[in-house]
Amino acid sequence: MKVFVAGATGAIGRQLVPRLVEAGHEVHGMTRSASKEQLLRDLGAVPVVADALDADQVAEAVGRVQPDVIVHQLTSIGPMDLRHFDRAFAMTNRLRTEGTDHLLSAGQAVGVKRFVAQSFFAAYERTGGPVKTEEDPFGPHPAKEMRETVAAIRHVEDAVLAATWTEGIVLRYGGFYGPHTSLGPDGDQTKAVRRRQFPVVGKGGGVWSFIHIGDAAEATVAAVDRGRRGVYNIVDDEPARVAEWLPTLARTLGAKEPMHVPRFVGRLLTGEVGAVMMTELRGASNAKAKRELGWSPAHPSWRQGFQGLTETDPDDARPDAAAAKGRR
């Protein structure tokens, strides 16, 4: 099939494009910057230069390619500041609202058969059991500093699932880790843990679901090939409380044990968003994705996956090598 990937040079795009090529698809990768055309060629894609926030440019690009499938992986995350979460996600929120609408409009005009879009697990209701399925609702009252971000995630999901003219698929990814992510060998979150700047807040009862960026890409290929209309949680097999995974991560990195601070101190340091994520977050189940997509993560637990954060894989460090690896 001919697959149009919007956000093809991002963390997941760099993993996804060569895997789609290896699976036999003709891949066209969209980027806003002409300077990234060679990167896309190295990954195995035909470069497409267009601004996702310009409806005419998106329509022209999609119209020229005439894809069978559109994969929406558009993000642009600024420096992370949990106290001003929506500020850091301001551009990504535009890409999830305006960008989604532009891609859907262009896709409808050419009759794409399948539309796959990125979402996130962390918006689930923060009451009830510790692990949520796709049938569970999003929480009605997100933390104040991330209301705009959750609204943008809702927009992506509602718009894609309402598109009756195509097979609309939403992938609720877990927290990414691995190459080119903030929890990569040189990522901001990894550095914060090493510097002992990532504390356990309260009892650390928030439940997180993780996914290695390579496993997320593999699941996305499966969704392109055989996904059905609806939502899939793309997470590993082991949701875990902060009080468990954060100290384990610190030990894996050879860092000191993370500090423990009361919730009110954590709220002063990280705002309401940080306090909520550390104490109230709910994890997600991957049972549906494993059952319907025929997919299982190569890193079934963050326990094994975090081991890779202590070293840099040369195949991941060089885009041309990564592409070659993907085509083998």
Image (cartoon, rainbow, N blue to C red):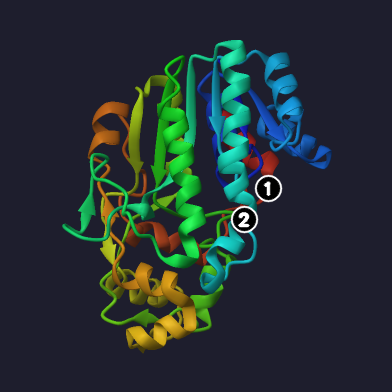
Q: Is residue 126 visible?
A: yes
- Judging depth in this view, the residue of 233 and 212 nearest the camera is 233
Q: Is residue 198 left or right of residue 78?
A: left
The residue sitting at the left extreme is 129
Q: Give the spatial CA distance, label 2 vs label 1.
A: 30 Å
Element marked by disc 2: helix
Q: Is residue 26 visible?
A: no
In which quarter of the view is residue 311 placed? bottom right
- Amino acid found under the numbered disc labelled 1: Arg
For residue 254, which numbered disc appears in the image?
none
Element marked by disc 1: loop
For residue 318, which numbered disc appears in the image?
1
Q: Earlier in the sequence, mark 2 or mark 1?
A: 2
- The image position of residue 307, as x and y in percent, is 42, 63
| Mark toward the viewer: 2 or 1 | 2
Residue at position x 62%, y 52% from top?
314
Question: What residue would you read off at disc 2?
Answer: 90
> In the rendered view of the protein, which quadrant contains the C terminus?
top right
In which quarter of the view is residue 47 placed? top right
> In the rendered view of the protein, which quadrant contains the N terminus?
top right
- The image position of residue 286, as x and y in percent, is 27, 42
- The image position of residue 195, as x and y in percent, is 53, 83
Instruction: Rate crowding at label 2 as few (under 14), some (14 to 19) or many (20 or more) other CA atoms within 10 Å.
Output: some
Q: Is residue 258 left or right of residue 309?
A: left
Q: Is residue 121 left or right of residue 285?
A: right
Instruction: Rate crowding at label 1 as few (under 14), some (14 to 19) or many (20 or more) other CA atoms within 10 Å.
Output: few
Residue at position x 73%, y 15% from top?
64
Does the residue at mark 2 contact the one at mark 1 (Cβ under 8 Å)?
no
- The image position of residue 324, as x and y in percent, is 63, 34
Q: Is residue 70 above or below residue 135?
A: above
Q: Is residue 284 left or right of residue 179?
A: left
